[in-house]
Image (tube, coloured by chain):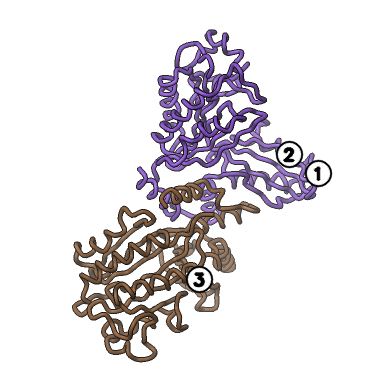
Chain colours: A purple, B brown
């Protein structure tokens, strides 16, 4: 099977100065073992979101280099923007991909957190699956009151960092480093104009209303198309496979006399999610993702690069 | 979308001497733009089958280097083996993969054929999709009577090569170069011990008996498991998608009161075949394979390599 690969989506508190954005992103370009998939800067949020995929060592090296650029250029004391933040390097979530499991990802996040603190002096909080304190699984708990509140608040026992001393870096604040599953945006369009029905179905499937684990869902009116949509985020595709979620929505829709018209995946999706769906619908037994030509090639390409 | 990639499965008339086999395979190792997926030598057939994936230029360069090694070491005048052959480099089929279409593949086969003849002096026949004469679509027509019959037969109008003069290379014979779709081996196991039923179903779906286009099928007894199998080769997954073939077998089985128990894919399968099946069963609209994380990565890895 393939070598372990991870996605990483670091968020930086800079969305306005192009030369700073480029200095932060540059370490991810043309580097063996790391691929820059995307980066988006938002001036209103004054925030930069970078999407990377790579191997643990190359990811860590390039993230550290990028962090040094961010810390050198960003001063949180003078930072304004709509998005909550506690640091110049605000959050660094790692996501397990092909060949990687969540415990590997938690180890990677914790290892990176210790290195990051040692090399930058910025205190670190671990969140989501990497959290060391249960309440810190929720990022909003870690970021409560943002940089400004943490400047004195960090000394309080419940806000002490997981790595580093209990004081913010003067200009770069603190950083939240986490591990989480890949998130799939899956929309299901229903042959109805009745938004109330879509709301009922969204409520019946979402975890927070007692529905399916790892499923978030809201209803959306697609008035121009004469349809309603159940817009879904799947936070763990193993616990909530696409076909299981769809089957449940189909049942709920049928009970109300309507049909699923079509579905869409918004953004990226790991091959495993589609292979699982194909294997299920094709009744495939004993299928190994290494049989997929392109996954095999990706593995070979990686071996040559390393 | 990804850069065009091709599979190539060259067959060489050498399955016994390890040092010759290694000299033939060596040009495919550690080379940018070419991946050696597999190679199998069979002493009884006295034949080597190599499985490659790569980009057009790198594939051609490495194939020429490999061909020179084979031509230097193999003498068809002294060659014996169970498998039909006309040359030291016997057949070179190209297969379009991600980002490539059959016309690209035919162009690649023809370009390679001309280069191969120019650089080695070995006459070339084009077969399957690359054929210039309709009857040469069938490889068995090109190889009729093998090396021995072609030594004098090549001068006859109907056997003149497509590239090069009408005489065999003294020791290396001739080479058949072709283009064909990827072949998927798809087995469907039925909950029955009645081989006659599997034979009926195989007959009802295979193209040669008036069934589905691009489908070959035979019945196999899985006596130890108490099942029978319809063993299928799909020669064009766009004309005969996995789910369409399975649906047809399910219908034929149900009409006879039996069920499909499970299926299997034997060997490699292109991602597109599974994505198509997943998209169909998930009712996905407007899905782009570039949304699949690993395919995107493969594309990025290739861009860096080139």
Q: Residues within 10 Å of mark 3 (few under 14, many from 20)?
A: many
Is residue A286 found left or right of B67 in the rendered image? right
Q: Chain of mark 3?
A: B
**B189 or B1: nearer the eye?**
B1
**Mark 2 and mark 1 in contact (Cβ < 8 Å)?**
no
- Residue at disc 2, secondary structure: strand
Q: Is residue A301 above or below residue B210?
A: above
The dot on residue A219 is: 2
**A251 or B168: nearer the eye?**
B168
Expressed as whole percent of the image width and height from the top left, the position of residue A113 reads 45, 24
Q: Which residue is mark 1?
A: A194
Q: Quadrant of residue A99?
A: top left
- Residue at disc 3, secondary structure: strand
Q: Residues within 10 Å of mark 2 (few under 14, many from 20)?
A: many
Q: Chain of mark 2?
A: A
Marks 3 and 2, how far apart at CA = 44 Å
The dot on residue B215 is: 3
* Residue in the picture at 29% in, 64% down: B65
**Residue lying farthest to the front in this orientation:** A19
* Residue in the picture at 47% in, 58% down: B270
Is residue B196 found left or right of B157 in the rendered image? right
Expressed as whole percent of the image width and height from the top left, the position of residue A241 reads 56, 43
- Residue at disc 1, secondary structure: loop
**A130 or A86: nearer the eye?**
A86
**Mark 1 and mark 3 in contact (Cβ < 8 Å)?**
no
Looking at the picture, do discs 3 and 1 lie on one chain?
no
Expressed as whole percent of the image width and height from the top left, the position of residue B62 reads 33, 62
The dot on residue A56 is: none
* Residue in the picture at 50% in, 78% down: B208
């Amino acid at each position: 099977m393939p070598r372990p690969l991870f996605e990483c989506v670091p968020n930086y508190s800079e969305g306005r100065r192009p030369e700073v954005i480029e200095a932060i992103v540059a370490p991810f370009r043309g580097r063996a073992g790391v691929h820059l998939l995307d980066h988006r800067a938002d001036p209103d949020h004054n925030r930069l979101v970078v999407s990377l995929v790579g191997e643990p060592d190359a990811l860590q090296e390039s993230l550290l280099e990028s962090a040094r650029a961010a810390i050198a250029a960003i001063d949180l004391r003078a930072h304004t923007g709509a998005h909550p933040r506690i640091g110049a390097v605000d959050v660094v979530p790692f996501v397990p991909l092909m060949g990687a499991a969540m415990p590997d990802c938690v180890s990677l996040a914790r290892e990176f957190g210790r290195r990051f603190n040692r090399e930058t002096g910025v205190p670190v909080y671990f969140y989501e699956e990497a959290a060391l304190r249960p309440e810190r699984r929720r990022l909003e708990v870690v970021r409560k009151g943002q940089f400004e509140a943490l400047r004195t608040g960090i000394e309080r026992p419940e806000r002490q960092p997981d790595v580093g001393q209990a004081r913010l870096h003067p200009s770069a604040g603190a950083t939240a480093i986490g591990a989480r599953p890949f998130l799939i945006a899956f929309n299901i369009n229903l042959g109805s104009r009745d938004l109330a029905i879509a709301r009922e179905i969204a409520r019946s499937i979402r975890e927070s209303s007692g529905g399916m684990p790892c499923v978030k869902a809201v209803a959306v009116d697609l008035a121009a198309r004469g349809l309603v949509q159940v817009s879904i985020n799947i936070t763990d595709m193993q616990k909530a496979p696409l076909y299981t979620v769809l089957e449940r929505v189909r049942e709920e829709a049928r009970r109300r006399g309507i049909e699923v018209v079509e579905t869409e995946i918004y953004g990226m999706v790991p091959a495993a999610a589609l292979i699982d769906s194909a294997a299920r619908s094709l009744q495939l037994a004993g299928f190994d993702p290494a049989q997929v030509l392109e996954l095999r090639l990706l593995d070979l390409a990686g071996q040559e690069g390393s």
